Image (cartoon, helix red, strand yellow):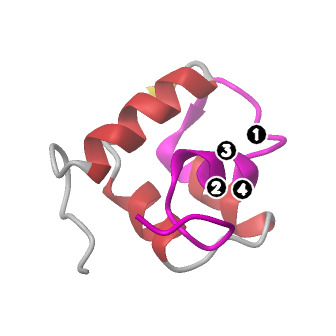
Amino acid sequence: MTRGLGGHSPANVAHYLRGVDFPADKQALIRKAKENGAEGEVLDMLEAMPDADYETAADVMKGYGAADDGTFGSRRKH
């Protein structure tokens, strides 16, 4: 897994989601990440997350984890 901004680690996702108002659906998370300069792998991972209303940042990390391990959606290509 790539580390540092631009990678898709949970810390990087949290960085790009700063300022999001919860609860937030997946599309609101994607919009906020784009506003904060996210691109590439981060957006791919957010797109792969389950369509849901996320109540907290912890809920986002759970959805992100599910997308990262291929549980939901199409997994990003390596």
> Which residue is depicted at the point 84% across and 41% down?
19
Tell me the CA gap for discs 2 and 3: 5 Å
Contact (Cβ within 8 Å) of mark 3 with mark 4: yes
Circle 4 residue: 16
> Which residue is depicted at the point 30% across and 52% down?
68
| Residue type highlighted by circle 2 | Asn
Tell me the CA gap for discs 3 and 4: 5 Å
Tell me the CA gap for discs 1 and 4: 9 Å
Circle 1 residue: 20
Magenta segment range?
Answer: 1-27
Q: In terms of secondary structure, where does tag 2 sit?
A: helix
What percent of the width, then of the height, locates residue 29? Answer: 60, 48
Q: Is residue 47 above or below residue 59?
A: below
Which mark is first along the chain, 2 or 1?
2
Circle 2 residue: 12
Horizontal arrangement in the rendering, residue 59 relative to residue 50 (left or right): right
What percent of the width, then of the height, locates residue 36? Answer: 80, 64
| Residue type highlighted by circle 1 | Val
| Residue type highlighted by circle 3 | Ala
> Which residue is depicted at the point 51% across and 54% down?
9
Circle 3 residue: 14
Tell me the CA gap for discs 4 and 2: 6 Å
Q: Quadrant of residue 52?
A: top left
Nearer the observer, 60 or 10 = 10
Contact (Cβ within 8 Å) of mark 1 with mark 4: no
